[in-house]
Image (cartoon, rainbow, N blue to C red):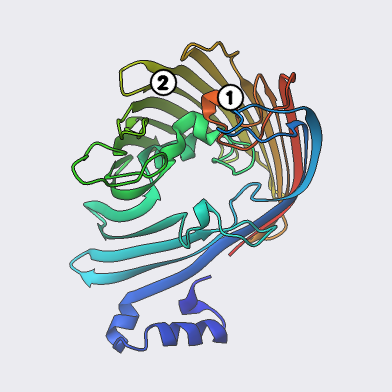
Amino acid sequence: MNLTHGTKRGNVVLALAFSFAGSAAQAQSSMTLYGAVDANLEYVNHYSTVTPTAANRFSTGASASLYRLNSGGLSGSRFGLRGTEDLGGGLRALFALESGFSLDTGTSLNGGRLFGRQAFIGLSNKEIGSVTFGRQFVSQYDALSQFSPTGFASQYEPTVAEIGADYRSDNVVKYAGVFGPLTAVAHWTFGNGVSGNGEVPGQFRRDSGYGSFLTYASGPVAATAGYTQYNPTVTQAGDTGSFKKAAVAASYTFNSRAKLVAGYRWGQNKMADGSILLRDDFYWAGANYHFNNGLDLTLGYYYDDIIKFGTSSIKNPWQVSFIADYNLSKRTDVYLTTAYTKNAGLNFDTTANNFASGYFLGKGQSSMFGVAVGIRNKF
């Protein structure tokens, strides 16, 4: 909802927000309130009755069926503000503040942060690109989200397994520029905070990270390639490891209705002493099809070849995901989303993925199935 073209209430809000500014500044500025609310009814089988934690040595319990009201099926529920100001000479200031919440309980996500999804400010120029500062999605997320079959949907997308837990980071400086068919994205984080304490005096490397991706898109063909590294705290003394990933992906669109995507991600996670914690090759492929009646179908396949996981032996997980999404209007849609995973919980939830997605597989089980029916409104 753009407050500059909203209802009488929106006009009042805008007038109050810019009451301190002159009329010329108002004409050159814009502020938008936006968001999404998404909820569904979900069924999951073979779900552990025990939550794996460090205290129980990440053990799972007996399996059972789970029925619940869930938040965030295709989109994480969120609201945000973004704005721009024309500074002249082709230069613009920009900002974004975005808060994630659980629709079923009304609680804040991202560790209870007010603006845990995004909080950044920056400058942009149409010809040169933009530089932004703050908490934001990093370069691998920006690039690979265009080549995900489900667009990194919240519920059944193994996002952490594919691109890492640091896909959204604190203390980021990010550059993005578009040059004809090429888009370049690069980032540096001074201290992520995913597994450490963020920026620490005298420890410049601690929890730092960086990466860059280059994307080409012309007509029906698109492709991307890039590298990212995160140096998380891995010991109580503050020693850092090195989590490295490199990825390539491509897509082809037929008649603006059908799209095929595929990608490969190389990964290597090392501890502070150089020992390999995880070495894997991740593959994915999928298809999207849009019908003129507002129905969109999505099919995705994911496979992780775990070459080495410390001294443990883990079977390679794979997952098939399917989405049927029907648009009731430009803003509201209803959907069916489902997934089946082998050798892991949904979204490759295992010790190798640090139980990142919360789909804990019950003891003695080797597969998990989930299905959800939901509704989403985007504003």
Disc 1 packing (10 Å; few <14; some 14–19; many ≥20):
many
Q: Is residue 128 visible?
A: yes
- Residue found at x 31% / y 17%: 274
Q: Secondary structure at mark 2?
A: strand
State which quadrant residue 322 falls in.
Answer: top right
Side (left or right) of 181 relative to 79: left
Q: Position of residue 39 (x, y in %)?
A: 70, 54
Q: Is residue 351 above or below residue 104?
A: above
- Residue found at x 64% / y 26%: 59
Q: Earlier in the sequence, mark 1 or mark 2?
A: 2
Residue on which the image places disc 1? 302
Residue on which the image places disc 2? 266
State which quadrant residue 102 falls in.
Answer: bottom right
Disc 2 packing (10 Å; few <14; some 14–19; many ≥20):
some
Mark 1: amino acid: Tyr
Q: Position of residue 61 (x, y in %)?
A: 73, 28
- Residue found at x 54% / y 19%: 304
* Foreground residue among 169 and 63: 63
Q: Quadrant of the C terminus?
A: bottom right
* Foreground residue among 297 and 360: 360
Q: Secondary structure at mark 1?
A: strand
- Residue found at x 42% / y 63%: 97
State which quadrant residue 356 falls in.
Answer: top right
Mark 2: amino acid: Trp
Q: Position of residue 268 (x, y in %)?
A: 39, 20
Q: Is residue 251 visible?
A: no
* Foreground residue among 107 and 246: 107
Label pair 1/2, CB-CB below 8 angstroms: no
Q: CA distance from mark 1 to mark 2?
A: 14 Å
Q: Position of residue 285 (x, y in %)?
A: 56, 25
* Foreground residue among 266 and 206: 206
**What is the total number of numbered labels drawn onto the structure image?**
2
